[in-house]
Amino acid sequence: MKLGHQMGGPLPFIFLLTVMHLPCLPLFHAQSTYTPKDVFLIDCGSSTNTTVDGRTFTADSADSSLLSSSVHSVAASTSARTAASPVLATARIFPNSSSYTFPVSPSRFWIRLYFYPFSFNAYDLNSAVFSVVANGFTLLSDVHVTSSIQNSNSVFLFKEYSVNVSSTTLTVSFEPAMGSYAFINALEVVSMPSDILVDNSSPLGMNSPEPLGMESTAAECMYRINVGGPAVSPSNDSTGLFRTWAANETNLFSTAGVRNVSTSRNAIVYTPPLPTYIAPPVVYSTALQMEDNQMPDNSFNISWVFSVDPEFVYVVRLHLCEIYFSTAGVRIFEIYLQNQTAYHSIDLVYTKGAAHAYYRDFTVNSSAGISSLWIQIGPTPNAAVSNNNAILNGIEIWKLNNSAGSLDGAMVLPASRSGSSRFKIVPIVGGASAGVVAMVLIVVGLLVFCRKKSKVYKHSPSAWLPLPIHGGNSASMASKVSTVSHKSGTGSYVSSVPSSLGRQFSFAEILEATNNFDEAQVLGVGGFGKVFKGMTDEGTKVAVKRGNPRSEQGITEFQTEIDMLSKLRHRHLVSLIGYCDENCEMILVYEYMANGPLRSHLYGTDLPPLSWRQRLDICIGAARGLHYLHTGAAQGIIHRDVKTTNILLDENLVAKVSDFGLSKTGPTLDRTHVSTAVKGSFGYLDPEYFRRQQLTEKSDVYSFGVVLMEVLCARPAINPALPRDQVNIAEWAMHWQKMGLLDQIVDPHLAGTINTNSLRKYGETAEKCLAEQGIDRPAMGDVLWNLEYALQLQETAMAGAMDEDSRNQILELPIRLPAQEHWDTSGAGGHSMNSMASEEDSEDATASALFSQLVNPQGR
């Protein structure tokens, strides 16, 4: 039985009668609010108080009793007041170590940080790099706020933490990186209920909770999602906790086959000991469930994917409330985390009752190299129920500090890096066993060894752990470990990197080329580390990718890239110039791509818009690069992370595919796919690859289809700020394409410049790429052919020499692809770069000649 015939309908009479006959059970429908004992809301750098969400943020000043600094801090402001929040228009800038100290009662506290960079006098907050520590816990380590904002969908950076304080003071400290400064726009320190984060989390594979030691643990709230309803602002969190609940669109893997349901907020029942502030009624009264209750295939799941940092423990909290059915045994479903069963055969009505709020915590360990967390719900297989369905109301994901007391993947900060410091580092007390002592001695020995080697470079601002380039667990790299020469007592470093990687740079040359890894020269940031703009001693501009040895993900991707780049040479793949593996570093040096990523020319910057001809040329170039990857060897290479940020443009806008850290060797001739864990970028991920974990070249084709739509519409692959039906560009664009109205969503800058036939061919090509099943997608060679044809249609129409209908479908043209290209194996006696370039020129000539005959047929 449903809770009403329509969403939001009244509870059935029989259910109300049942509730009325349970007077001994204390039920709470009204939502009580929590009143914190200690509240500190600081508008940093402001001279006047500011009211936001009904709360007053107090202006701070340099002589505030809460603020202490070894040097005078700076109050900064900007005239461009952001619409997001008025507290972001001012900031407190710290040229040196500084801190806020709050008198508190021992309790668990929210710490909420707000960052919005702007320029003020001599300070450009966009280049600031700094760390933040709270009572010994590292909240942020060497954060570059601007990069973090660019990698998000927000105009400012908001971070929320929970720290348990056992003393009577809570100190939030800011430590600038060497040569930089720190800043903060607004700060909240608010006591929180003790029963919000408790030791009741169940590890995967276990049915009972296992203590995590939450009384001595700090946590960061990574995600808080109102799954079935709209975003909830702090002022609308009716519990008094002023939390932000994001809408569901960003992390939902696919909107196909799902729908929202809701009921009255007053219908939600909170049964003690569940605190009424655990989540507001707006969360429990809305939900997402499967669209079809009679779905015959009960293997269908609703899936969410979240980006996470590897090598941390996460607490995943799922809020559950049956608001659609009122009878037990009607809906029985499974909860899966990381492809493992987390909760088996859950019947919410039987377990808690209809419309009763309920939550369950699970512990997930994000192992090395795992950067995505998957949550799935689906019907219990073979369950004897009338409805194959599942439901979820809310999601919270908390990251717990690691053994070093850090929430940002780095070790606890040293005592000082840029002057005096007030940081008190909490020591990690270990056992006194001989095994532990021996391990410590080994680690210290390794660090001393690398430290001696790097002493000459002591002025480098690096705070990275000096680990060997081949220090990972990859078996494929085991034979490549660098060695110490037996002929020298100074530990000469013998490189084992393949000679095909080009010039071997010294670390001193890298430092000079990048101006000591100047943060102002950062081109991008990824799981591997950072990419810097540089210049060699010969005056050649280069891009320097510096691997971060703290990140196991980065090491793995770095090793993959080394493996791939020793084989790849192509005009439309970013070329490797050289490398540096000296001084325990892992650095690759690429050609500098002057015009940066394709994405920056489509949206989000003030760069001039690309013409339709330029966009087609860029897509054709990228398709050539991917076609080479797929067909250049017996097994080929699957890129696995095709997106507009991984297509770079040189000074002539020639497209080159980059970033091969996730690439995978294709299947052998007797196999159709490669079975592997799902990796890639949300919004570009092949749904078939996700469901089956079977990777093929067609997964790249799907991602490229998303790129084609992104190029045409000039908007992100995922935009959570848009209405629900427009969030995912692949689904939204396909809706218009199938109606024959693709021209209605074209980038306005292209209005009136695209030939109808060229657009039709382009749309057909993208539609084929985005087919749900890989078998229905074209090969990359066919995509290349059709894009070339779309370009020819555009050029011929511009010349006024063509008037024909191009409604042919993919593969209907008599395709004559150029001969397969071969790997450059010059390191093993193969082709040289020059010979590869000539192959590419030959390919272009062949394609051009062939197209000229097809589009402009003449007698022979």
Image: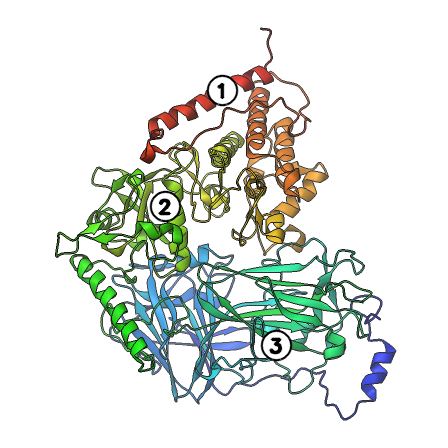
Residue situated in front as seen by the camera: 57 or 148: 148
Mark 2: few/some/many CA within 10 Å (<14, 14-19, 20+): some
Per the image, label 1 sits on a secondary structure element best described as helix
Q: Quadrant of residue 260?
A: bottom right
Find residue 537 and report its horizontal and vertical position in percent: 20, 40
Q: Residue at x 24, y 46 (%)?
A: 513
Marks 1 and 2, how far apart at CA: 32 Å
Circle nearer the viewer, 1 or 2: 2
Crowding around mark 1 (Cα neighbors within 10 Å: few <14, some 14 to 19, many 20+) is some
Please tell me whether mark 1 or mark 3 is closer to you in this view: 3
Query: Disc number at residue 846?
Result: 1
Residue occupying image coordinates x 42% and y 70%: 407
Q: Residues within 10 Å of mark 3 (few under 14, many from 20)?
A: few
Specify which label sits upstream in the sequence, 1 or 3. Answer: 3
Question: What distance separates the C-alpha of mark 2 from that of mark 3?
Answer: 43 Å
Residue bearing mark 3 = 207
Tell me, yes or no, whether the two marked residues, 2 and 3, touch with CB atoms within 8 Å.
Answer: no
Which element is circle 3 on?
loop
